[in-house]
Image (tube, rainbow, N blue to C red):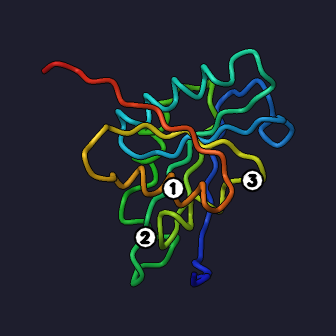
Amino acid sequence: MRQTQSPVTDRVREGRVKQNRSTAPLDIVVPFTTPKQTEVALRAAQRLGAGLDSAVRVVKVQVVPFPLDLRNSPVPVDFLEAQLRNLCGDDVSREIRFAREYEDGLRGVLRFRSMVVLATQKRPWKTRTERLAASLRSAGHTVVMVPEEKTNA
């Protein structure tokens, strides 16, 4: 497996969290995938951490294509911040990370023994989220997969 070093920058916006995420024994990370799946994963993460000394973080990894400088995201930062604020509220830590590759950016925010919570739709084929979960598990991270609720439209 080839190790690549991709440049990454962070932009952190903290909500009003009860526990400082650096001192919480259980770090629960919810990567932003789609608004609906992230909301499902966030609810599951909050249920998992209820009654425990835990901190829940929602991480949005924004991929910036190579010709652009990492500080010049193709998506306005204000939009990304508003998107996370509307989804999470003020009781969850929110982070925006700019990276060249999604998975490298996500791995950069995971700490030792972080738990990653992902929601996915059940498909006959492996979804992008399931491939991400398998990759994180092979790297030694704990990953919890939550099925996305079906809605009748």
Please, which residue is most extreme toward the front here?
Answer: 124
Report x, y in % for residue 54.
76, 29
Question: Are the two marked residues, 3 and 1, in contact with CB atoms closer than 8 angstroms?
Answer: no
Disc 3, SS:
loop
The correct choice, above or below, for 146 with respect to 59 in the image is above
Residue that badge 3 annotates? 111
Report x, y in % for residue 144.
56, 38
The residue carrying pointer 2 sits among few (fewer than 14), some (14 to 19) or many (20 or more) residues within 10 Å by Cα, namely many
Q: Residue at the spot x=23%, y=21% of the render?
A: 151
Name the one closer to the observer, 120 or 56: 120
Give how far apart the Cα atoms at labels 2 and 3 are: 23 Å
Residue that badge 2 annotates? 64
The correct choice, above or below, for 137 with respect to 70 in the image is above
The correct choice, above or below, for 42 with respect to 115 in the image is above
Which one is in front in this view, the residue at disc 2 or the one at disc 1? 1
Give how far apart the Cα atoms at labels 3 and 1 are: 17 Å
Question: What label does residue 134 carry, if any?
Answer: 1
Kind of residue at disc 3:
Arg
The residue carrying pointer 1 sits among few (fewer than 14), some (14 to 19) or many (20 or more) residues within 10 Å by Cα, namely some
Question: Are the two marked residues, 2 and 3, in contact with CB atoms closer than 8 angstroms?
Answer: no
Of pointers 2 and 1, the one earlier in the residue sequence: 2
Quadrant position of residue 152:
top left
Kind of residue at disc 2:
Val
Report x, y in % for residue 38.
44, 36
Kind of residue at disc 1:
Ala
Please, which residue is most extreme toward the left here?
Answer: 153
Give how far apart the Cα atoms at labels 2 and 1 are: 24 Å
The correct choice, above or below, for 41 with respect to 32 in the image is above
